[in-house]
Image (spheres, grey):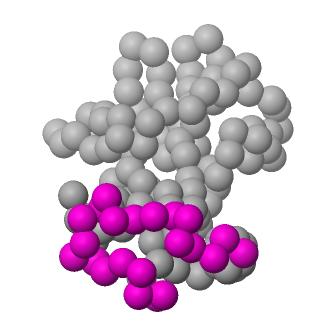
């Protein structure tokens, strides 16, 4: 795999730290996009500069997850949020009760929506702000 492919995967999977390291090494001409990824040596990076890049989020990466929150024995809501705690807070604010539980799901999990199949990763692109409700699930019948 070449650096360019790995760099693009960092954006796809929201791997902020690695993306910022690659960005820094590219800016310092220590690697190129066409190099084999084996050429990446994180020890060549100025760790303080990379820390500042990450803190300033110069690449604009915002990691989001998808969380299933149990509303009742049969009802669940899926919420996009930055953390499990944020999902629970959003649920509590929205429904004025605490969820029975909260579990994270893979963004690559695919589900049927109408006649199509969509992953949570692709569904997330439909939202402009977060946290956000992705949909509801009822045991015995899906509501997405």
Instruction: Using residue 118 as the reference point, say whether residue 138 is left or right of it.
Output: right
Residue at image position (21%, 58%) is 1
Residue 94 covered by magenta stretch: no
* Foreground of the two, 2 or 104: 2
Q: Position of residue 105 (x, y in %)?
A: 49, 33
Query: Does residue 85 show up?
Result: yes
Res 126 → quadrant: bottom left
Residue 42 covered by magenta stretch: yes
Quarter the C terminus occupies: top left
Q: Position of residue 112 (x, y in %)?
A: 26, 34
Q: Position of residue 12 (x, y in %)?
A: 37, 60
Residue at image position (35%, 41%) is 108
Instruction: Using residue 4 as the reference point, say whether residue 27 is left or right of it.
Output: right
Q: Position of residue 8 (x, y in %)?
A: 33, 67
Which region is colored magenta? 27-48
User: From this viewpoint, which residue is outermost toward the left?
Assistant: 115
Compared with residue 17, is residue 95 higher up or lower down, i.e. above or below?
Answer: above
Instruction: Using residue 75 as the reference point, say whether residue 99 is left or right of it.
Output: right
* Foreground of the two, 143 or 60: 60
Number of numbered discs overlaid on the protein picture = 0
Compared with residue 36, is residue 24 higher up or lower down, i.e. above or below?
Answer: below
Query: Does residue 94 show up?
Result: no
* Foreground of the two, 54 or 14: 54
Res 30 → quadrant: bottom left
Res 13 → quadrant: bottom left
Residue at image position (39%, 13%) is 140
Residue at image position (62%, 50%) is 81
């Amino acid at each position: 795999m070449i650096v360019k492919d790995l760099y693009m995967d960092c954006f796809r999977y929201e791997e902020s730290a690695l993306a910022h390291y690659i960005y820094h090494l590219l800016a310092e001409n220590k690697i190129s996009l066409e190099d084999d990824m084996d050429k990446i040596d994180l020890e060549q990076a100025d760790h303080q500069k990379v820390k500042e890049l990450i803190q300033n989020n110069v690449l604009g990466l915002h990691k989001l997850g998808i969380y299933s929150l149990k509303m009742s024995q049969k009802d669940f809501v899926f919420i996009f949020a930055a953390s499990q705690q944020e999902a629970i807070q959003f649920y509590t604010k929205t429904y004025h009760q605490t969820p029975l539980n909260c579990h994270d799901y893979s963004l690559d999990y695919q589900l049927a929506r109408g006649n199509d199949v969509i992953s949570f990763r692709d569904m997330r692109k439909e939202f402009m702000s977060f946290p956000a409700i992705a949909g509801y699930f009822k045991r015995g019948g899906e509501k997405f």
